[in-house]
Image (cartoon, grey):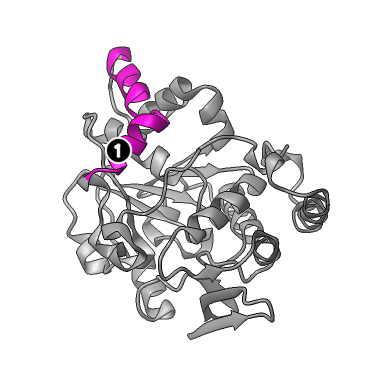
């Protein structure tokens, strides 16, 4: 494993860990290879749930709504435990019912999840919105892994050196898509960020049915109201949003998660040239996936 720092002639700075040709967040715990082995061996209990997303794909939103359903409360649960960034022994001792999160591509998730011993919720979001949201997120962090312009960041995002956890959005999405097609043992619910925005209640109902949780409509409607952007943003601004793990990133570890949470913001940000470049790379890297991916791309 190596820590890589790249600075171009305009001062744009990118920092990541490299392991076996892949890039991982500099916030990944310890030695990447050792941490990946521990993640793969994470033990499973009945009713464990693993939330899987590429960064800035609605992680905290879906985590909190699924956690409310799982625990049968309307309590704000803050930032999820990201298994690749935590001590697995500590993760293993978490009280049930447990819900974990990962940004890792499919090949690196716990073996128990691959074998269907753990339920998986996977969320996909339009990559153009992901790119800009991720840039804004990194721009608001202290000790960020990226410092620079959005134009340069878009080039990073379209490459395999994006500051994520094991690959670009394209690699992450293709590996998850392939994993879902070829692993019949998976217990997985696949959601789309844009679908959640269009009809939140129906997706909340899907989550409840997938988790096997018996809730009446009154409770699920209360969950729908509790996870509105405004409510979550307000809760996150309290001590409930603070995390010891991310104190080095600023604001007592309260990550700058909630900004706008809308669909299609990229249209107000991308230049014509940036959009054309993005489209060309998307066609090149995702052409063999085809329409079955069902990404609401535009």
Residue at coordinates 47% horizontally, 21% vertically from top-left?
202
Q: Position of residue 164 (x, y in %)?
A: 52, 64
Give the structural element (helix, strand or loop) at label 1: helix
Q: Was residue 93 drawn as part of the magenta stretch in this picture?
A: no
Residue at coordinates 56% horizontally, 29% vertically from top-left?
195
250 to the left or right of 286: left
196 to the left or right of 82: right
For disc 1, the marked residue is: 67
Q: Position of residue 47 (x, y in %)?
A: 28, 42
* Quarter occupied by residue 226: top left
User: What is the magenta segment's predominant secondary structure?
Assistant: helix
Vertical position of residue 134 compared to residue 153: above or below? above
Residue at coordinates 82% horizontally, 48% vertically from top-left?
272
Q: How many numbered discs sit on the rendered protein?
A: 1
Q: Position of residue 254 (x, y in %)?
A: 31, 54
Highlighted range, magenta: 217-238
Residue at coordinates 39% horizontally, 81% vertically from top-left?
31
Q: Was residue 231 drawn as part of the magenta stretch in this picture?
A: yes
* Quarter occupied by residue 212: top left
Residue situated in front as seen by the camera: 111 or 98: 98
Name the outermost residue toward the front.
10
Q: Position of residue 85 (x, y in %)?
A: 35, 66
6 to the left or right of 274: left
Vertical position of residue 238 compared to residue 33: above or below? above
Crowding at mark 1 (Cα within 10 Å: few <14, some 14-19, many 20+)? many
Vertical position of residue 166 compared to residue 287: above or below? below
Name the outermost residue toward the bottom.
2
Vertical position of residue 52 compared to residue 7: above or below? above
């Amino acid at each position: 494993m190596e820590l890589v720092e790249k600075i171009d002639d305009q001062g744009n700075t990118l920092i990541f860990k490299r392991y076996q040709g892949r890039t991982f967040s500099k916030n990944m715990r310890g030695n990447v290879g050792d941490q990946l082995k521990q993640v793969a061996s994470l033990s499973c209990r009945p009713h464990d749930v693993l939330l899987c997303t590429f960064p800035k794909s609605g992680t905290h939103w879906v985590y909190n709504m699924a956690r409310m359903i799982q625990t049968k409360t309307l309590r704000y649960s803050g930032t999820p435990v990201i298994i690749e960034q935590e001590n697995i022994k500590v993760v293993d001792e978490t009280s049930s019912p447990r819900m974990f999160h990962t940004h890792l591509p499919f090949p690196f998730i716990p073996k128990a999840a691959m074998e269907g011993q753990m339920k998986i919720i996977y969320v996909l979001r339009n990559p153009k919105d992901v790119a800009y949201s991720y840039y804004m997120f990194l721009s608001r962090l202290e000790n960020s892994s990226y410092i620079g312009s959005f134009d340069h960041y878009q080039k990073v995002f379209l490459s395999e050196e994006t500051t994520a956890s094991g690959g670009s959005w394209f690699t992450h999405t293709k590996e998850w898509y392939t994993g879902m097609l070829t692993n019949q043992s998976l217990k997985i619910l696949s959601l789309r960020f844009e679908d959640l925005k269009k009809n939140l209640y129906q997706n909340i109902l899907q989550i409840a049915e997938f988790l096997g949780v018996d809730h009446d409509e009154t409770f699920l409607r209360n969950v729908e109201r509790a996870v509105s952007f405004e409510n979550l943003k307000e809760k996150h601004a309290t001590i409930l949003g603070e995390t010891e793990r991310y104190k080095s990133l600023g604001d007592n570890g309260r990550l700058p998660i909630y900004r706008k949470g809308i669909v299609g913001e990229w249209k107000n940000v991308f230049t014509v040239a940036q959009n054309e470049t993005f489209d060309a790379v998307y066609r090149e890297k995702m052409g063999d996936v085809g329409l079955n991916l069902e990404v609401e791309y535009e």
